[in-house]
Image (cartoon, rainbow, N blue to C red):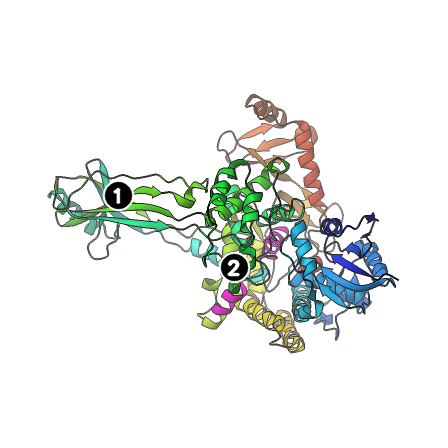
Amino acid sequence: MIMKRLVIAEKPSVARDIARVLHCKKQTKNYIEGEQYVITWGLGHLVTLADPEAYDKKLQTWRMEDLPMMPEHLKLVVIPQTRGQFQAVKTQLHRKDIGEVIIATDAGREGELVARWILEKAGNKKPVKRLWISSVTDKAIREGFAHLKDGREYNNLYRAAVARAEADWLVGINATRALTCKYNAQLSCGRVQTPTLAMIAAREEEIRHFIPKPYYGMTARWKGVTFTWKEKKSGSSSVFSAESREEAFRRASGGTGKVVDVKRMKKTSRPEGLYDLTTLQREANQRFGYTAKQTLNIMQRLYEHHKILTYPRTDSRYLTADVAETLKERIEAVATGPYRTFANTLLKGKIKTDGSFVNDRKVSDHHAIIPTEQPVTLSALSVEEKKIFDLVVRRFLAVLYPACEYEQTTVEIVCGGESFTAKGNVMLRPGYKEVLSDEEETEVKLPSWEKGENVGAPVLTKTEGKTKPPARFTEGTLLQAMENPVRFLSKKDEKAAQTLKETGGLGTVATRADIIDKLFRTFLIEKKENFIYITGKAKQLLTLVPEDLKKPELTADWEGKLNHIASGKLRQDAFMKEIRVYAKELTTEIKDGEGTFRHDNLTNKSCPVCGKKLLSVNGKQGKMLVCQDRGCGYKERVSRLTNARCPVCHKKMELIGAKDNQKFVCACGHKESMKAFEERRKKEGAGVSRKDVANYMKKMKKEEKEPLNNALADALSGLKL
């Protein structure tokens, strides 16, 4: 009998790519077979941790007296919706002609968990190998199969993944049930979502208590050039004392200017590093208004479907030395369309690499996001995909281009004892700035100046302003704060700060988008324009949650220990022993809490199912009415936020009403019927058909069917990232 190898991929699309490379052509519903390999797949997770009621039927009802729930061993169960695929994988696994298993799920902690839980639940006894690749191009797959790893090398990574999942179950479910039972409201908490929420609340407090402070400055003009005043003592361009500025203004008014210094310096600038996922999500939010989840989904398509970008869930902005050897093929792959000229310029010369973006020690699981060796067909990409691909390709090419060189001239003039300066730049060599389409380098050429030159009386202008509060979070800046939450630590703790830095902050690059999305879905945050606001529900929740759960230090401690488990420095059972003690303490603290919770968004409209008053909430896609009873779950859409712009203020409008009575409304007061909207858009040459609107409504209805108010589902969602 010819023995075959069973390959388990994470998704069908990746399985098909592997099957093609390995020449497996016999296609079935659940696997693809060839002469040497059988390729099957998960649908993400096929197996997960059991719900509480799997241990005892009475736990199906949420009661405070049953808490904390502490099963001695956490059970694995097959996810009902994907049971058929699990049975198919299990059947292939136990075939007599299968001699070895190859794990080909995503190369990371969660990917390891996906495959290992399937194998454990299916009762695997066969030897395991590991495919560890960062892109799914044919070349990467071939090379990966030529250098398979022994599966045992990843046992500690698996232990860390199990520890993370079980810890989140014990803490998340117990704390969520305790809060929900204690206050009879849909409340949930977690070690990542709660400190993230606390950061948003802290920013709101900063803004609320901020007192604007006026500041004063002045400018002077000579030879048509504007010079900025520099205060003597501080060297600052403004002061908080109006009297100080007035005195300086009087002195300068009575004097004549003299050039006391002219400096000319050659300067260089380098591009920012390559993208990791968080940096890319941040920039896509800033430039295009894309949510973190939206950017990740687009990236996943570019990685899995088009195969033109490498693995997106990375926290590194560096390449390893072996990947750097493939740069020529990657440049050739993007030598098309708007990138052809830049790529060909690089290919004509020697491709230079240096420590600014190549460093093996700064790459853990996956290197920075860069193009693959797969030639790209730009016409096959959607508008969204083109935008994200463009960001990555231009940053990739820019890093390989020479530095930008320019000459900076600084002129200082003293007038009446007061100092004024002006700067001008003259480009010598644009370098990488040629590649970045957004880099509009405006040269400021100064007239010729000679040291000691008298330039006469100035034209003076007084300037003033007020200090501004810190900006509200956008999804982009919130991602940045989650990545580096050090300034939100409850006290100055250098060890905790260092751990947060080493472990990548709150959550991981793979989970942050889901955390933010969950905060929107559970109505703890809402969006106005591109800014995030905390809801009344969230403010109350933060007064009821134990202090410990609000601190970034908790996740820093966990991630540090999980990393130690992955590297073999800490035993999994020792970590879990600590977690069980912590979960018990947390549950007791919530039980003994003396706070209260009241809905501050009740309406006069009653639920058609249970008769209780409905709550008015701002969902991510618009306004909704939801039942206050966590067991009911009724919800109805009131309005939807659209991409249609108001003709008056150009903000996004909401669509309200149903069928023939639909109309667009804007916060500025503008209203127009669907018919008037379509006619206006047609005149503007950007017609929106009824089919477009119908497709949009269909998409919204699909989103409405997703679970919204199930606190247990929310608690468990962290286990299926």
Residue 676 falls in which quadrant of the image?
Answer: top right
Residue 713 in view in this figure? yes
Name the residue beneath numbered marker 2: 483
Kindly report the secondary structure that dominates the magenta region of the rendered protein: helix
- Secondary structure type for disc 2: helix
Left or right: 212 in relation to 497? left
549 is within the stretch colored magenta: no
Residue 62 in view in this figure? no
Residue 501 screen position, x and y as percent: 49, 65
The three-letter code of the residue at mark 1 reads Thr
Q: Earlier in the sequence, mark 1 or mark 2?
A: 1
Label drawn at residue 373: none
Which image quarter is the N terminus in? bottom right
500 is within the stretch colored magenta: yes
In this rendering, the answer to whether 394 lies above or below 103 is above
Name the residue beneath numbered marker 1: 463
- 505 and 371: which is toward the camera: 371
- Secondary structure type for disc 1: strand
Residue 521 screen position, x and y as percent: 63, 51
The three-letter code of the residue at mark 2 reads Glu
In this rendering, the answer to whether 426 lies above or below 84 is above
Q: Residues within 10 Å of mark 2 (few under 14, many from 20)?
A: many
**Mark 1 and mark 2: Cα distance apart in space:** 38 Å
**CB under 8 Å between callouts 1 and 2?**
no
Q: Residues within 10 Å of mark 1 (few under 14, many from 20)?
A: few
- 375 and 460: which is toward the camera: 375
Residue 623 screen position, x and y as percent: 62, 43
Magenta-colored span: 497-521
The mark closer to the camera, 1 or 2, is 2
- 240 and 49: which is toward the camera: 49
Determine the residue positioned at 21% across, 52% down: 231
